[in-house]
């Protein structure tokens, strides 16, 4: 897959997430149902938080020489930052705006930029290409939980997404 195709997939993530929460009520968003332990709201806010951290990491790799990329405790953020009180539509809008902004930067990157790296505080050296692929996979992995939660709640997901 070319860099342009990977960036396209990254960019499409915001539309997929928006469709995945379409029609979820605030009451449904805060219920903790299986699969997993988090509510839909906690999951969506985690995806936003992760993307915000990820964009910071990718920008550091592009702009700085061998930067430190700090880990964070997602469970502590979930426990202390009250994601159930946050409107998921606003979280998705911010997720989309940040991905749109980062996509513009990524489209300007060269092959040499994608080979640049930083040092993750827990997992070691990560290239820009690895970070980008990781944030695509991260969203895909959590969407499975989100769809499962919607199934448990008995809510319908519109089949409008065609992959385009």
Image (cartoon, grey):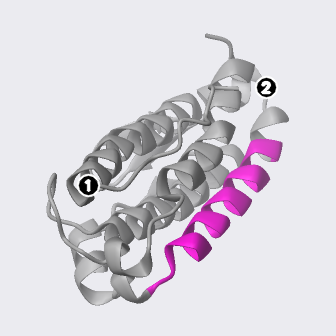
CA distance for labels 1 and 2: 39 Å
Per the rendered image, the range of residues in magenta is: 86-104
Q: Position of residue 90 (x, y in %)?
A: 60, 75
Residue 83, given in percent of the width and then of the height, sits at 37, 81
Front position in the image: 156 or 10: 156
Residue 63 picture location, percent across and down: 72, 50
User: Magenta stretch mostly in which secondary structure?
Assistant: helix
Residue at screen point 68% across, 30% down? 7
Q: Is residue 18 above or below residue 116?
A: below
Residue at 38% from the left image edge and 72% from the top image edge: 41
**What residue is disc 2 on?**
110
Q: Residue furthest top?
A: 1
Q: Is residue 3 left or right of residue 34?
A: right
- Which residue is at 74% across, 21% downward? 4
Could you tell whether 112 is left or right of 86 in the image?
right
The one of 12 and 160 positioned closer to us in this rendering: 160
136 lies left or right of 3: left
Whether pointer 1 and pointer 2 mark residues with C-beta atoms closer than 8 Å, the reply is: no
Examine the structure image and report whether residue 101 is included in the region drawn in magenta.
yes
Foreground mark, 1 or 2, reads 1
- Residue in the foreground of this view, choosing between 113 and 43: 43
Residue receiving disc 1: 149
Earlier residue among tags 1 and 2: 2
What is the quadrant of residue 78 in the picture?
A: bottom left
Residue nearest the observer in this picture, 138 or 69: 138
């Amino acid at each position: 897959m070319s860099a342009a195709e990977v960036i396209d997939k990254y960019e499409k993530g915001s539309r997929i997430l928006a469709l995945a929460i379409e029609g979820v009520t605030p009451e449904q968003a805060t219920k903790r149902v299986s699969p997993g332990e988090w509510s839909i709201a906690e999951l969506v806010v985690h995806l936003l938080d992760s993307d915000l951290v990820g964009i910071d990491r990718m920008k550091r790799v592009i702009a700085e020489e061998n930067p430190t990329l700090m880990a964070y405790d997602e469970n502590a953020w979930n426990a202390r930052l009250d994601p159930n009180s946050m409107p998921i539509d606003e979280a998705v809008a911010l997720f989309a705006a940040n991905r749109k902004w980062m996509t513009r930067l990524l489209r300007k990157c060269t092959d040499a930029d994608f080979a640049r790296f930083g040092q993750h505080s827990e997992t070691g050296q990560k290239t820009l290409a690895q970070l980008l692929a990781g944030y695509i996979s991260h969203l895909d992995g959590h969407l499975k939980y989100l769809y499962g939660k919607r199934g448990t709640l008995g809510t319908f997901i519109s089949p409008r997404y065609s992959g385009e």
